[in-house]
Amino acid sequence: MAEQANWYVVHTYSGYENKVAQDLMTMVENRRIQDLICDVKVPTETVVEEVFDKRGNKTGEKEVQHKLYPGYVFVKMVMNDNTWYIVRNTRGCTGFVGPASKPEPLTEEEVAKMGVENVVTDLSVEYKVGDTVEITAGPMEGSVGTVEEIDIPARKVRVKITMFGRELPAELELHQVKLF
């Protein structure tokens, strides 16, 4: 392909970000144009919220996904008339971000700053496969287990925990585990 795919920002109706992303990826698969529309993302962050009962007493914590940019979807694509038409006419999409709705690609600095592409190669952890670790957050907090797998790009770690005489696998984020 002579042209390079760039990241573009698309306006959506509020609350329709995931639906637009899903519909767009379905359309890409059906038309087999993965080389033109490479990726669609709705950047989110995991936030720990406190849970209270009816009396206002704290009963625990839960992890919730919050959209970093409500009302926007990020699309990595090669811009041409066909791809513009496909994205622009996806249900829930109101247009591209740019002057006079002319699509303006994000710069590499903007992509890095906004966290659209998570290229993580230099991240390191203090534990390795086979080490005994303690879970520091989430529903299994305080449990001890053995590291089975570490996935740095996905920022995940799989830990085997023994509970009630059974071995249970738990997939956690890297920051939820520390060396025991």
Image (tube, rainbow, N blue to C red):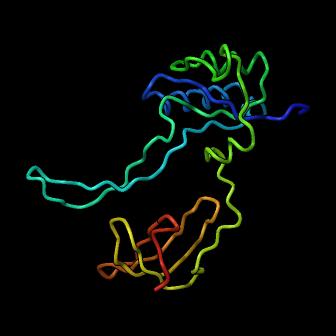
Percent coordinates x, y for residue 6 in the rendering: 76, 34
Indicate left or right for 116 with 36 as reference. left
Assign the N terminus to one quadrant of the image.
top right
Percent coordinates x, y for residue 64 in the rendering: 38, 50
Assign the C terminus to one quadrant of the image.
bottom left
Q: How many marks?
A: 0
Q: Is residue 129 above or below residue 7?
A: below
Q: Is residue 105 above or below residue 143?
A: above
Indicate left or right for 171 with 59 as reference. right
Q: Residue furthest left?
A: 55
Q: Is residue 152 above or below residue 21?
A: below
Residue at position x 43%, y 44% in the image: 66
Percent coordinates x, y for residue 29 in the rendering: 67, 31
Residue at position x 57%, y 32% in the image: 73
Residue at position x 58%, y 80% in the image: 126
Indicate left or right for 156 with 27 as reference. left
* Nearer to us in this view, 30 or 6: 6
Residue at position x 27%, y 56% in the image: 50
* Nearer to us in this view, 22 or 177: 177
Indicate left or right for 91 with 87 as reference. left
Q: Is residue 100 above or below residue 65?
A: above
Percent coordinates x, y for residue 51 in the rendering: 23, 54
* Nearer to us in this view, 175 or 40: 175
Q: Quadrant of residue 43?
A: top right
